[in-house]
Image: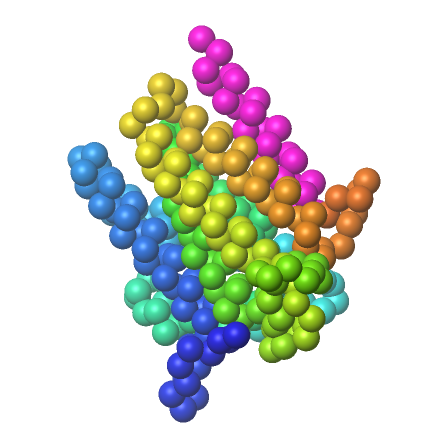
Amino acid sequence: MYPELLVLGPIVISSFGAMMVAAFLSCNYLLKKEMVNANLDEDLADELTTRAALGGIIGAKLYYIIENIPNGSLGDTYNGLINILIGLFTLNSNSISMGIQTIGAGLVFYGGLIGGTVAVTLYIKRENYKWFDIADWIAPYLALGHAIGRIGCFLVGDDYGKQCDYWYCIAFPNGLPPTIFPVFPTQLFEMTAYFLIFFYLRFKRKNEASSGNLIAKYLILVGISRFLIEFIRVNPKYLIGLSGAQLISFIMIIVGTLLLYKLNKK
């Protein structure tokens, strides 16, 4: 694989860091363009993506540390977050990439989803926006950012699945951790699912009758996708043979379904 895209002396651009930067910049650009077309303030897009990105990275790392105590390094996390914070506010992609590299590959998406939700919710509350309106704007780009991030996971050789012998299975001899045996490329499966969810939610934006429908559908579709893919991943099982990601996915599906029913009951 390609864990490092570019090395210039002490500066190392990791593939995962580059994809994280690409996810942030592309989501920010498309959301800003969409909001301008809807006669909304483009600065709102900058605020939302910046807070979602920063809160998401903090939440993702905290989730990882909690699951891997005492293996998590708080010192590296602190230094990495400082670099990311500087990069986000100065739009310096190198600083963001270096911060992500310092933090390491220990970023868990569902922790990021929780952290990003908290950060954006605090902003929504402070500015007196309607939560469902903002959530619907963000929903497609949560899926898009996740899809791009999974490309980084594939290039690094992280988050792969169980051993298999099908033609599409891939070995990651330099992965995290390395494997010389072919495994399910679950990063690509997730990437495909999330790209499809992004296009679906983006297409449905103008056709939804109730505010909140898009975020509800996001919860359902992403929850189902991750729940099913987890069966061929190697994450530890916690309850009735299900992984932590599957338990969270199940909650997402239930919450999304109840929300969709309540919003459209009339």
Q: Among all residues in the image, which is located at the extreme front?
A: 167
Residue 32 vs residue 238: left or right? left
Q: Which residues are magenta?
A: 244-266
Q: Position of residue 244 (x, y in %)?
A: 70, 47
Measuring 58% from the left and 48% from the top, which residue is drawn there?
Answer: 110
Q: Position of residue 149 (x, y in %)?
A: 47, 58
Q: Residue 64, located in which quarter of the rendered image?
A: bottom right
Q: Is residue 140 above or below residue 172?
A: above
Q: Is residue 28 above or below residue 71?
A: above
Measuring 57% from the left and 69% from the top, which residue is drawn there?
Answer: 157
Q: Position of residue 255 (x, y in %)?
A: 58, 29
Q: Among all residues in the image, which is located at the extreme top?
A: 266
Q: Is residue 247 magenta?
A: yes
What secondary structure characterizes most of the magenta part? Answer: helix
Q: Is residue 101 above or below residue 219?
A: below
Residue 60 appearing in the image: no
Q: Residue 128, located in which quarter of the rendered image?
A: top left
Placement of the C terminus among the 4 image quadrants: top left
Q: Closest to the observer: 185 or 259? A: 185
Residue 112 vs residue 39: left or right? right
Measuring 53% from the left and 47% from the top, which residue is drawn there?
Answer: 113
Q: Is residue 10 above or below residue 237?
A: below
Q: Is residue 130 magenta?
A: no
